[in-house]
Image: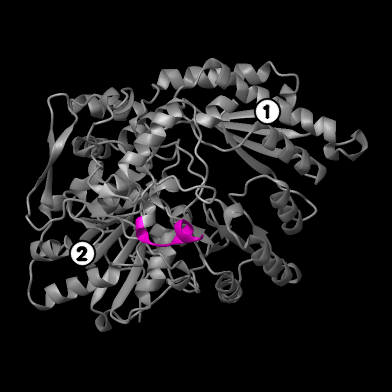
Amino acid sequence: MKRKLALSDEILMQVEKPARYIGNEVNSVMKNKEEVDIRFCMCFPDIYEIGMSHLGIQILYSMFNSWDDVWCERVYSPWVDLDKIMRDKEIALFALESQEPVKNMDFLGITIQYEMCYTNILQILDLSQIPLYAKDRSENDPIVIGGGPCSYNPEPIADFFDLFYIGEGETQYRLLLDTYKENKKNGGTRREFLEKAAQIPGIYVPLFYEEEYKLDGTVKGRKKLYDKAPDTVLKEIVMEVSDTYYPLKPIVPFIQVTQDRLVLEIQRGCIRGCRFCQAGQLYRPVRERDVEILKKYAVEMLNNTGYDEVSLSSLSSSDYSKLNELLEFLIGYCNNRYINISLPSLRIDAFSLDVMGKVQDVKKSSLTFAPEAGSQRLRDVINKGLTEDVILDGAALAFEGGWTRVKLYFMLGLPTETEEDILGIGDLSNKIAAVFFDTVPKEKRVNGKVQIVTSTSFFIPKPFTPFQWAKMCTKEEFIEKAYQTKKGIMSQLNQKSIKYNWHEADVSVLEGILARGDRKLAKVILTAYKKGCLFDSWSECFHNDVWISCFEDCGIDMDFYTTRERNEDEIFPWDFIDCGVTKEFLLREWKKAMKGETSPNCRSQCQGCGANRFGGGVCFER
């Protein structure tokens, strides 16, 4: 198929990294548009380098294009330089593969990984010349679908989407697209397609529901505007992950992207049950990929891409039962081919350090620990399952193994946090530095010292976690906690070995509002977009004062969504979604957290979370 670039050479020469916009990368798929029935544009609402690093889009892109009747293309958010040019010259946003306008597609599928991308979703729709509100779209506009973790509370952005796909995309998309084809063949309307789609498992059509509120602003209930729309939407889940689709020819970008490596997903879900972690609840139960299939995939994908690094992807790689066997195979295959192996999400113990010693070169990169809290009491509250002894023993083993740089991740503002917990962050950082000096003799100290990089983010209560009832700190409280942390670190004996970083407080507050918000927030998001808010996840682009003015203009109290603790019986905006984990279980865990009681991991003892209803995975290992 002949393709003409949507942007002239003159425009491409004016923008940063023009390769973001030209497509035609290795393994991208070109089809004849006359020979397909459905054109689907897959969108990640951030720049190319971040969107191209997302495995979920690679999986769906490859799966859709394996079907003869579908052509799936991609689009990402144009950076601010091209955004301005496209508006000035009235150029419609285009898909990378065909370079044709997104508005000509049948579907626009947007993956929503992060709340701070919400204004970018409006940018995508606006530049595509698609009406922002779903209710204003005509028969000629694409069907706009949302998916990804933020779709588990779709309400703040529900007005902008025709439908949401809740859960894992491999199960129902074929039926959804067939339903669209059938409806189109029979001359059906947009509304008729949405009515049929609403009856497909995992599909949520916001247009068919209306939120009702109590006088205090909390949700009273939901009124159905279409009788056949379901009362609850159960997430879609793939139980046999070894048999599901995997992209053996992933697209290889022309320019360096954030995760510039081959990604091998070894399992889905996590057994650990940290009470702040949304992903750990949403993706239950844990399901492992067969190790022989993973070996085969790795070889084939490396041959198809030419990558010099393979990353094993999961929420907790150490918990994959065949990790040793898989690594022995990969080390044997990769070492003489000069291919690196990267292992994120490892728990730091003797086994993991032995593994990392095998896969990392003589030049050791940094090791990452995530204690999350500065005291054992608070680690028990959040159910981290990590004691100080385990952390210090892991550090000692790491230093003996030659590592000299350790990254530590903590959260500030966790429920029940005290000043003692905050000062414990500096104390633990200091103890780890002391372990280095106690463990490594002077003559063996490379560069003579250790570097501890201590980072804090601010706690944000997320839907479908035991902490969804928790109150959140104000910006001022967060900043005070970061100041206390810094003061605590500076008072330590080994302070020169410790570097401290912290996250922006105002961004965290806004993320907290959007995470647990309701439909009333749509007008705030739209107002912020119209006032120029874009790329809010990029610190250089974030304008907190503009956002605050938007809440004031819309008459919405920011504190309502953040600083109040929820009642146990409060109806949440996302309660109509069933993620497999019951609200009763989450409430039980919330109460245990308040008592400082821990819960064992899924492999040790079932906690009755509700995910065993799916009939497989870790729930049925024994």
CA gap between label 2 and label 1 equals 51 Å
- Report the residue marked by disc 1: 429
SS assignment at label 2: loop
Snapshot quadrant of residue 371: top right
Residue 325 in picture, x, y percent from top left: 67, 66
Residue 423 in sight? yes
- Residue 621 covered by magenta stretch: yes
Q: Disc 2 marks which amino acid? A: Ile
Q: Disc 1 marks which amino acid? A: Ser
* Image vertical order of residue 81 relative to residue 31, above or below: above
- Residue 107 covered by magenta stretch: no
- Report the residue marked by disc 2: 200
SS assignment at label 1: helix
* Image vertical order of residue 586 relative to residue 496, above or below: below
Q: Is residue 333 left or right of residue 593?
A: right
Which is nearer the eye, 297 or 288?
A: 288
Residue 101 in picture, x, y percent from top left: 26, 65
Q: Residue at x 24, y 62 (%)?
A: 201
Which is nearer the eye, 535 or 513?
A: 513
- The number of discs equals 2
**Magenta part of the protein: which range?**
613-622
**Is the magenta region chiefly helix, strand or loop?**
helix
Residue 52 in sight? no
